[in-house]
Image: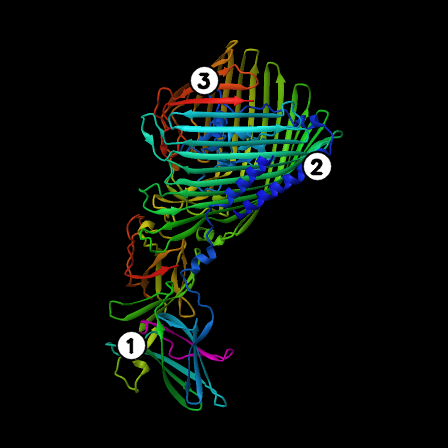
Amino acid sequence: MEKIILFLTVLCCALTSCTKEKTDYEAEIDTIVPERSGFKEVTQFQSGAYTIRIDALGGNLYKGYNKVHVKISGQGQAPVSAATLLPIRNGGTAQAHSCPHSYQLTYNAGQGYFEGYMVFTEASDPLSQWDLHIGYTADQPYRVVQQVPVQEQDNKNLGMTSFTDRDGAQYILALIAPQKPKVAENELVAGLYRFDTPTAGATAPFPDPAQFSYSEVQGYTILLDPRMPEPSMGNHSSPNNKDLLHGADNLYHGVVNYTMTGNWTLNLILHNQQGDLVRGTVVPDDFTPGVVGVKSELHIDILF
Amino acid sequence: MRRIALVIPVLIASYGLRAQDRTLQSDTTTVLQEVKVKAKAKKKIKTDLKLAVSVDEFLASSQSISFIKRGAYAWEPMLNNMSSERSAVTIDGMHIFGACTDKMDPVTSYVETNNLSTVDIKSGQEGSLHGSTIAGSIDLQRENTAFGLDKKVGGNYQTGFEFNNKQFFNLAALSYSGQKFAADGSISFRQAENYYDGNNKEVKHSQFNKFNSSVGLSFKTGERSALRVDAIYDKAKDVGFPALPMDLWLSRALITSASYKQLFEDGIIQLWDTKIYYNAIEHYMDDTTRPENLVHMDMPGWSTTYGLLSKIALQRDSYRSEIQLNAYDNLSIAEMRMYPQDRSNRTMFAYSWPWVTTRFASLSNTNSWDLSDRSHVVLGGSLGVNYNYSKYAEFNWIFHPGAPQEKTRILPGLHASYHIDIAPFTLSAGAGYGHRAPSISEAYGYYIYNSFDRYDYIGNPNLGNEVSYETNASVGYQTGRMGIQAKVNYFYIQDYIVGKILNMGSPMNYQSVGVKGYTALDHANIFNLALSAHYDILTHLHWKGSLTYARATDGSGGNLPFIRPISYQTGLQYMYKRLGIQTSLQGDAAQRDYSPEYGEDKTAAYQIWNASADYTLPARKVNMTLQVGAENILNAYYSTYADWGNIPRMGRNIFTSLKINF
């Protein structure tokens, strides 16, 4: 009987050794997708008697779509009734230019701040920076300029792309959601913007908003074909995806299914209101193991 | 796996506790030996041809079982020509679920012949005692030494070598029978290299290594009660699956149980046996030995089951009854991680079983009345509740948006049969009705690659129950020298679950050609016929023969896959004093009714010839038998209808074995 006990003890030791751990699925995606929860302060500065504070998700501005909260307050000062936001990129070799943004900010009375967004097309670098031109109206109109750092996008699921159509109009397409995709059905949200080419020269002192205007493109359709470009995945795709349609919030909403984690490409085809092709190419749908997936000329890469 | 580590000390502790009060009770040892719920002919674990067999080889000798073979190891048993999810495979009534999505580890691969006493195969709803089933049940019954036998210590040892695949095996078992304490223990090792087919060509990746050990301890706790703890530990390492694109690196199973049995002297209740059990299985596939694979993948799987089984046997006069409560909770997890060709890139991960919990409880009852000395009626039924929960249901929603994350089903079953014995004829007829819930793969599987038809399979959580209506009959004729028996059964199965090509999605596994989703056919028909006969030509010369035929179609007349073509076996056995000589011829006819839709091609007929001779050495007390034989003597090159990917079977195999019983 001692032998039996000994045997069981040995067995017990044998069983505790050498086994593979299960994957921690919740943590699996965290390793590669940075979590940005809550609006935090990006910058705060004085403008006369007023203090202006800009908040963004995670406290940083990134290349791509950024939603911002602008709080303008002054002790004993007249309340601010309206505010505008205009990002301008300065320096470098390029001419001063802007990026898609909401010029007229909307006031959120409940929270006491103005809301808007900016879709930065480049990150800041030592030679060129982004300046935010903020205008606000209290007892009188005020203007202020503040430089803000814009970082490279480290979330590979919030990519953006810019392109031109046949008539030379400039478009920007930026992903807004999902910030943290899952192996699941994901609500896909994107913003589509077009540069309003100025018809006349500047009529106001720099920066003249009419020279830097972008509009939210309405009523277009973005056809979606997500695929895994990795050669070993052989152009793998997923079922039950829904093309992106223009919604009441002026954003584009669709559904993307990711069948596993890893590199994906959202192959897109943009059609205008008339159903005419604006940009994008059809990608092959055959299964081609060992071959890098062909991407549409309009695409955004994903990694989670 | 930490849980495994916990259970063992508990078992040891319970052993220690029980060992102390061994001196309390006086001897009533005979009582426990007489437990017979219903007399069952116990079949020794050997075949006509071979004395030392594997569990698979032993099961293959049953007419109602056929096998899907993916290599030389871990064959998937098909009962009544139905795949394993349609039958209830248990070990002593305990439910165990393989941890491999590709069915590389059927329950039968986690036991070894030297810890089994018998295998109880029941066809159709008759098998519903252990849980809901369609095809029937296979219960692997463990060795269980009674208290107070005259022979206190017994044991056996088997060793042997098979030349074709250089399989070397050593199996040993020991038993102890005391007045208050009984124990069984076994240990076994098998090691085999690649086998060679009938063209003397090596079938690569067909090696295997298996270690199995078991221990069972019984303690008498009262005059009519006993406590028993059991454990099986099985480990297979470096097992090749030539028909699959990957092999097995390691699979381990720990199967434990503790049971308490109480016998009653008077009254209608004869016995009450309650068991709690726990088993954990881990299964890790390996494709690093397949450099031809484009994509490196890890596919680990885990399956953990807790269960309870409680059985009461009743008897009064001509009435016998068994009431059984089954309950279990299983968690099955399977992962796949694909590695990009540039390993610095992100790996790709998904669950092929997204943490699926199955909870099942059933109450079943079988009653038997002797109407007269010659006839009896059996009536039985079961009612089960099956609950499934998919933790990461978002995987399932990709193909089935909005499917429920949890699902509860009611699984009823009923069966009745009438048996009559009019010498020299025995006749029986029966009918049954039963439901089964879809398996984990069928309901929640996600991109499970099937290398047979080369499709990725997607489970469907919305699937309904599969419902079976069956009838069966048998007729036997027996005289002193000869016997002949015919058995038929017919299943009409509503909502028969199969995989159908989906016109959405695209393959994930690089070998795959498309995606199939599990769906329910309106119905399927399965018919099985088995004939067997034996004749004693001389006192020492016996002939045995058998023939099986099966036909299965889907609702629209198409063939179902993996249905055995006409098969036959004929064998002669000669025994003289200590010498035994056996020879047999077996084969399948050409597969006429194959199913291209499910990836089958026509398999040609084959026939193989086997022979063996054994000699029992004259020795006192110790019974020592030597055997030499050969399978496939003519070195036929063949593969059967159920050989995955048409891998060839083993060519000529000379085997030797030595068996010592003491």
- In the image, what residue type sits under mark 3? Thr
Residue at mark 3 to residue at mark 2: CA–CA distance: 55 Å
Residue underneath mark 1: A128
Magenta residues span A101-129
Is B37 left or right of A286, judged from the image as shown? right
- SS of the residue under disc 2: helix
Q: Are marks 3 and 2 in contact (CB under 8 Å)?
A: no
Subunit under mark 3: B
Subunit under mark 2: B
Q: Categorize mark 2 by other alpha carbons within 10 Å: few (<14), some (14-19), many (20+).
A: few
Residue underneath mark 2: B21
Q: Are marks 1 and 2 in contact (CB under 8 Å)?
A: no
Q: Are marks 1 and 3 on the same chain?
A: no
Picture quadrant where residue A146 is located: bottom left
Q: Nearer the viewer, residue B636 or B511?
A: B636
The relative height of residue A20 versus residue A211 in the rendered view (above or below) is: above
- SS of the residue under disc 3: strand
Tell me where residue B206 appears, x and y as whole percent: 38, 33
- In the image, what residue type sits under mark 2? Asp
Q: Which mark is residue B570?
A: 3
Of badges 3 and 2, the one in the foreground is: 2
Query: Residue lying farthest top?
Result: B538
Subunit under mark 1: A
